[in-house]
């Protein structure tokens, strides 16, 4: 059984102390994340950070060394099948039978899944814009078309949870925008989306919550707004930036000061801007500009993944 | 992009779906048809060559004990099933090995193993369905070979005025059916080995290379062991090929027709085991190979090929 968690609703996917070790290499270490019903959850990390291994364990393809994955209350290591019926996945690159057409690949999938009507094939092909090339062999498809077919296959069984590992790989800007539009649409329909992507701008636009991993370890998890707040700085400019830096360095709640393109980026709570201005004025240091340093998910991601060694 | 909800349809039983899925894929796979065409083409080619030879005025055999007329009569319908099956039991094994290894190994090279594994109920059911469908296609291929052989042989028989079908008795038909199943049985060990090696090695080449290597090395190593004498001498009796030959020798093939492997007399001279023991040994091989495939496939992580 799935459980509920306050305002967020049902937990439909949870990892508990998940670990995967290949010999001496630890691909995923003690990962604890939760995905709630109807949310878009993004899973971010640099290459080799264990994202695809985690997805593999979520789908029951890879056996954890320790810990477990619970999807819809089912242990994916012991008995993945009942939960897999409710999950659609595009894991790593899309993979299909090269000699079959796009249509026949989806037809094969309907045979395997059993309870899906054939006209669903036309629906999902229309949805991903592959209707006109549906009868062409899969091997003749471009990388972007293959990804679209992968998304179509993930949607075939009308899943409650959709796991998309780099769904925009190989897509042109228009295709990327379509996928970006599709993800919140899926969430609006009450489906949950677990998204792995390198396109942080896209992730920021569509995600409710984000987890960031590095070297297989979770280094941050939370709502997108929360993460962005955490990464916010003050931005100021003065006639004498060096003197201002000196004063700021002596303030206890200022965690750091950095000169960037003629400005000072001050790592301090944004709500302390007025107090900071008052302190500098008392030292006869007057600011020509003061405001929040607007940040984005990419800056937060880079700050977290490049800043910490663990 | 808009998404539409869609009604579901009643599902077939899980096992039936897996069989239908595997059959759909293999039926649409060009390799399946190419292998079938090679087998059928081989039957036609060998019949054509032997028919041509039987038109020449010459003798055959080690002691020149057979005439052209003997060869032509051996090409008549009476021996068509046995001759077609002798080709299936020799060259056909190689084709079955390619099909079995390809069906399993290609899933890894295409990466489709992940698609199937996240859509099928269980890994054991998935691999079992695949193996059974491959074997079913091999059985159909053997049947096609027999049909083509009988058709060609029927034409030869008719053209040579031998259209008498008095030989078709219940006993004759029983022999043909038994020969068919004997031939299918001897294909199983090598097919299972190819399947297992492809599953363990996660590649088609592992399955084909390993199995064909064994097929090629067995007679050579066996001959050397027999030559070495002592305790070496009896080891080849446990080889798959030695036991396969014992089973195939039960199929009644006219002596004038080419036979790939020793006949009953040669086997008796070597002190070969009975066909019952040979069948048991081959069964043990099949069980071991399939158990290895199932064990490896069930336990291992499924990652791209």
Image (tube, rainbow, N blue to C red):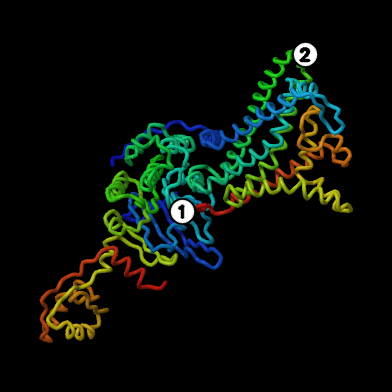
Q: x, y (%) of residue A191? A: 35, 46
Q: x, y (%) of residue B197? A: 63, 49
What residue is shown at x 76% (from left), y 16% (from top)?
B168
Check disc 2 and report its element: helix, strand or loop.
Answer: loop
Examine the rendering and report whether any part of residue B293 can be seen.
Answer: no
What residue is shown at x 30% (from left), y 50% (from top)?
A172
The residue beneath circle 1 is: A58
**Horizontal side of residue B121 vs B72, given as left or right:** left
Q: Check whether the beta carbons of the residues at disc 1 and disc 2 lie within 8 A of each other.
A: no
Q: CA distance from mark 1 to mark 2?
A: 67 Å
The mark closer to the camera, 1 or 2, is 2
The image shows residue B301, relative to residue B120, as above or below, that is below
What residue is shown at x 24% (from left), y 78% (from top)?
A258
The answer to whether tags 1 and 2 share a subunit is no
Chain for numbered disc 2: B
The disc label shown at residue A92, or none: none
Chain for numbered disc 1: A
Q: Quadrant of the N terminus of chain B?
A: top left
The residue beneath circle 2 is: B166
The image shows residue B191, relative to residue B40, as above or below, that is below
* Label 1 crowd (10 A; few <14 / some 14-19 / many >=20): many
Check disc 1 and report its element: helix, strand or loop.
Answer: helix
Which is more toward the observer, B79 or A144? B79
Examine the rendering and report whether any part of residue A229 can be seen.
Answer: yes
């Amino acid at each position: 059984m799935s459980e509920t968690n306050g305002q967020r609703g049902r937990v439909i996917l949870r990892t508990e102390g998940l670990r995967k070790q290949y010999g001496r290499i630890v691909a995923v270490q003690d990962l604890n994340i939760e995905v709630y019903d109807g949310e878009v959850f993004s899973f971010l990390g640099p290459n080799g950070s264990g994202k695809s291994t985690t997805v593999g364990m979520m789908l029951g393809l890879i056996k954890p060394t320790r810990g477990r994955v619970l999807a819809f209350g089912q242990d994916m290591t012991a008995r993945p099948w009942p939960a897999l019926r409710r999950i659609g996945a595009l894991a790593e690159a899309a993979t299909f039978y090269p000699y079959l057409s796009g249509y026949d690949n989806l037809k094969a999938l309907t045979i395997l899944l059993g309870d899906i009507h054939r006209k669903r094939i036309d629906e999902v092909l229309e949805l991903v814009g592959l209707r006109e090339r549906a009868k062409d062999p899969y091997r003749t498809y471009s990388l972007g078309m293959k990804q679209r077919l992968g998304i179509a296959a993930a949607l075939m069984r009308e899943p409650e949870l959709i796991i998309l590992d780099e769904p925009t790989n190989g897509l042109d800007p228009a295709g990327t925008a379509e996928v970006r539009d599709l993800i919140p649409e899926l969430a609006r329909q009450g489906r949950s989306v677990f998204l792995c992507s390198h396109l942080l701008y896209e992730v920021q636009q569509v995600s409710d919550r984000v987890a960031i991993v590095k070297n297989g370890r979770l280094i941050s998890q939370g709502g997108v707004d929360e993460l962005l707040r955490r990464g916010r700085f003050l931005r100021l400019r003065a006639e004498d930036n060096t003197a201002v830096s000196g004063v700021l360095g002596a303030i206890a709640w200022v965690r750091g000061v950095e000169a960037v393109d003629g400005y000072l980026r001050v790592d301090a709570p944004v709500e302390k801007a007025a107090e900071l201005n008052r302190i500098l004025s008392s030292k006869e240091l007057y600011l020509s500009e003061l405001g929040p340093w607007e940040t984005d998910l990419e800056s937060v991601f880079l700050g977290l993944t490049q800043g910490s060694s663990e | 992009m808009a998404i539409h909800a869609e009604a579901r349809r009643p599902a077939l039983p899980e096992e039936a779906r897996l069989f239908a899925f595997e059959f759909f894929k293999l039926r649409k796979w060009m390799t399946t048809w190419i292998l079938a065409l090679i087998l059928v083409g081989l039957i036609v080619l060998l019949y054509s060559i032997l028919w041509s030879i039987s038109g020449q005025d010459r003798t055959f055999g080690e002691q020149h004990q057979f005439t052209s007329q003997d060869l032509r009569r051996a090409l008549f319908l009476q021996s068509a099933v046995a001759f077609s099956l002798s080709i299936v039991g020799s060259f056909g094994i190689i084709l079955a090995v390619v099909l079995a290894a390809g069906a399993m190994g290609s899933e890894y090279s295409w990466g489709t193993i992940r698609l199937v594994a996240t859509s099928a109920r269980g890994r054991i059911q998935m691999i079992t369905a695949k193996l059974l469908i491959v074997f079913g296609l091999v059985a159909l291929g053997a049947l096609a070979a027999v049909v083509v052989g009988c058709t060609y042989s029927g034409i030869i028989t008719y053209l040579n005025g031998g259209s008498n079908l008095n030989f078709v008795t219940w006993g004759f038909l029983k022999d043909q059916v038994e020969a068919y199943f004997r031939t299918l049985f001897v294909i199983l060990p090598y097919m299972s080995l190819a399947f297992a090696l492809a599953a363990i090695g996660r590649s088609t080449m592992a399955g084909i290379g390993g199995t064909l290597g064994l097929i090629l090395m067995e007679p050579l190593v066996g001959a050397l062991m027999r030559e070495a004498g002592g305790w070496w001498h009896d080891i080849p009796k446990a080889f798959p090929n030695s036991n396969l030959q014992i089973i195939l020798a039960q199929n009644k093939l006219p002596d004038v027709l080419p036979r790939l492997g020793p006949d009953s007399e040669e086997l008796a001279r070597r002190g070969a085991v009975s066909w019952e023991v040979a069948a048991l040994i081959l069964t043990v091989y099949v069980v071991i190979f399939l158990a290895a495939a199932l064990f490896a496939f069930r336990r291992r992580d499924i990652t791209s090929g």
